[in-house]
Amino acid sequence: MRRVTRWEDIRPGDVWSVRGYGWISRAIRFFSAGDWNHSGLVLRNAGAGGLFNLEALESVRLNPLSSYRAAWDRRDLAVYSPDVEAPVLREALSWIADEEGGRYGWISTASLAVVLPLQRILYALGIRRQVPTPFRRARKCSELVLVYVRHCAEIALRTGDYAGYQSTRWAYTVPDLETFTPHDLVTCCEAHRSA
């Protein structure tokens, strides 16, 4: 993975984590014991309209990447590019686009008020196990990104893009999709940066 250092270098296929300062963002960071509270991936270029990212909020949907420009300027947006060949990226992006439209539903979203504090208690006890969010019908943000990076690794291996596979295979060392957080994404990408 390569860290993107200029806004104009962000491309479809890049993954990101952001640090927000609203009360929900602060609560997520506190209860997940991390520095980052939300993740997503750049899905496509809308031509002159700019880039769009795929992110899981109360539903998995496309949003303009420009909504995170202020966070970028504050250095609260970390963006990484998988070191895979263009055909691998195209196939992985095509596959992950099918996730768009998945919804959490209001019962699942409301259950976070119970799940997040319980999660913090478990972390404080040294138990690194994600409390499942009941009734959910879509992937959470960091889980969506991890599944995408795993798919990049699978395609790279299948197509013989061994450099790309080496860059993204860390996604398979994560023991459980549900324990993966936006903070974990930044930690893993930083640990596996290419020269």
Image (spheres, rainbow, N blue to C red):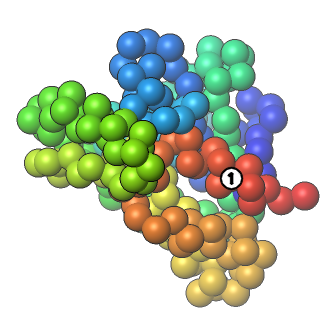
- Given residues 125 and 91, the one toward you in this image is 125
Q: In this view, does 150 lie above or below 8?
A: below
- Give the left or right position of residue 14, taking residue 101 as reference: right
Q: Which residue is drawn at 43% across and 12% down?
A: 22
Please tell me whether mark 1 sits on a helix, a strand or a loop.
helix
Image coordinates for residue 118, horizontal then vertical, percent: 26, 38
Q: Identify the residue position indicated by label 1 in the image.
A: 189
> Do we see residue 92 in this rendering?
no
Q: In this view, does 51 lie above or below 99?
A: above
Residue drawn 25% across and 45% down?
A: 101
At horizontal 47% and vertical 29% (from top left) the residue drawn is: 29
Quadrant into which the N terminus falls: bottom right
Quarter where residue 72 is shown: top right
Q: In this view, does 166 lie above or below 120?
A: below
Q: Give the number of marks.
A: 1
**Quadrant location, the C terminus:** bottom right
Residue 87 at x, y percent in the picture:
64, 70
Question: Residue 177 vs residue 17: left or right?
Answer: left
Q: In x, y percent, where is residue 23?
A: 39, 13
Q: How crowded is mark 1: few (under 14 residues within 10 Å), some or many (20 or more)?
A: many
Identified by mark 1, the residue type is Cys
User: Residue most toward the front?
Assistant: 125
Whether residue 133 appears in this view of the structure is: yes
